[in-house]
Image (cartoon, rainbow, N blue to C red):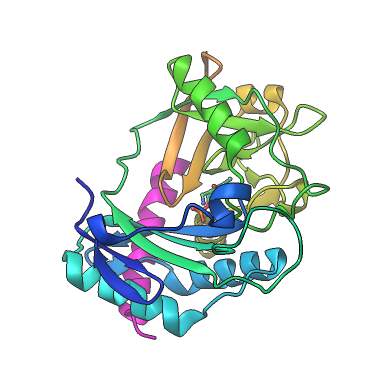
């Protein structure tokens, strides 16, 4: 059951009274962006970083972001009204309601949604499949924006799930792995270096990815950016997914072939938990 209150366009409402127009261009054209934030012990982890990415997504799509003070007030109201302890919060910003058509006109009022759902439980280890579709490339949409256009992700993930897995990994035109449909990819090469595809390859600048890179540097782990081939992943000492939903999850298989297990995933998972605790201490929720 989702928590009973949502925040919509400046108001906290019971779920049954929160309605979005059938003319909303987010619904009609995918003209929207969003963020997903995990709440641990009532604290929204890495809230500032999520707001920064949301502002950047809005800027890239030319959507009017209501700003940090608005979202922080919405989040505080949502957490308080629903007594949230552990939750996944989703912020959605859409173009708003206007007649169908791509004609210019008076800009509609943006739609701003903040809602919470029970948090997903990541698997102990992930079974991933190569995605059936490619991620929307930078030539079509800025890859640093977290837009509402998730069809390649959805269809690819559904394909992976139908094959008994839980996540799909996108590849580029050369067959190099980029990221998951809701996660970033890390692996440990045979020399022991932790590697992740560069953002320039076209993956989302994951907040968890950033935290793990900073934590790895703090722990003195050698890090490098590289998009792995299938052979790289099969020869890796280990591989893992990072994300707000997946947190830090080791990869057990790729298309049914085993991926080695090692100590890095556990080390990074512990460091990630510590980073969340430090964030809760340093940045309690405020406007
Ligand atoms: N890549 C994609 C395509 C995603 O949707 C997500 C989830 N937001 C991620 C990576 C991981 O990002 P984060 O660590 O910010 O959740």
Residue at point 43%, 52% (across, down): 244
Q: Is the residue 96 above or below the residue 80 in the image?
A: above
Residue at point 56%, 38% (across, down): 181
x and y percentages locating residue 97 in the rendered image:
54, 62
Left or right, residue 140 beside residue 62:
right
Left or right, residue 269 beside residue 188:
left
Specify the segment rendered in magenta.
Answer: 262-287
x and y percentages locating residue 192 in the rendered image:
60, 40
Q: Quadrant of residue 213?
A: bottom right
Q: Is the residue 96 above or below the residue 67 in the image?
A: above
Left or right, residue 19 beside residue 41:
right
x and y percentages locating residue 250 in the rendered image:
44, 35
Magenta segment includes 282: yes
- Magenta part, dominant SS: helix
Q: Quadrant of residue 9?
A: bottom left
Left or right, residue 195 beside residue 87:
right
Comparing 230 with 96, the one in front is 96
x and y percentages locating residue 127 in the rendered image:
46, 24
């Amino acid at each position: 059951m989702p928590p009973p209150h949502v925040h919509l366009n400046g108001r906290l409402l019971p779920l049954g009274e929160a309605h979005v127009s059938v003319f909303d261009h987010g619904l009609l054209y995918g003209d929207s962006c969003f963020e997903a934030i995990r709440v641990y012990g009532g604290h929204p982890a890495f809230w500032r970083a999520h707001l920064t990415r949301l502002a950047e997504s809005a800027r890239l799509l030319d959507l009017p972001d209501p700003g940090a003070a608005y979202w922080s007030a919405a989040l505080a109201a949502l957490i308080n009204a629903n007594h949230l302890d552990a939750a996944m919060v989703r912020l959605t910003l859409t173009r708003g309601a206007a007649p169908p058509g791509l004609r210019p006109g008076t800009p509609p009022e943006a739609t701003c949604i903040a809602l919470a759902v029970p948090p997903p439980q990541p698997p102990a280890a992930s079974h991933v499949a190569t995605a059936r579709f490619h991620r929307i490339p930078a030539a079509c949409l800025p890859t640093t924006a977290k837009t509402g256009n998730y069809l390649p992700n959805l269809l690819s993930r559904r394909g992976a799930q139908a094959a008994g897995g839980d996540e799909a990994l996108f590849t580029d035109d050369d067959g190099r792995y980029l990221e998951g449909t809701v996660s970033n990819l890390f692996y440990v090469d045979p020399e022991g270096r932790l590697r992740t595809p560069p953002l320039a390859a076209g993956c989302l600048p994951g907040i968890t990815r950033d935290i793990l890179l900073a934590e790895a540097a703090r722990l003195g782990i050698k890090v490098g950016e590289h998009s792995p081939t299938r052979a790289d992943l099969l020869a890796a000492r280990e591989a893992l997914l990072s994300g707000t939903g997946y947190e830090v999850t080791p990869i057990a298989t790729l298309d049914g072939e085993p991926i080695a297990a090692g100590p890095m995933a556990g080390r990074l998972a512990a460091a990630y938990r510590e980073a969340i605790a430090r964030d809760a201490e340093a940045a309690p929720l405020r406007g």
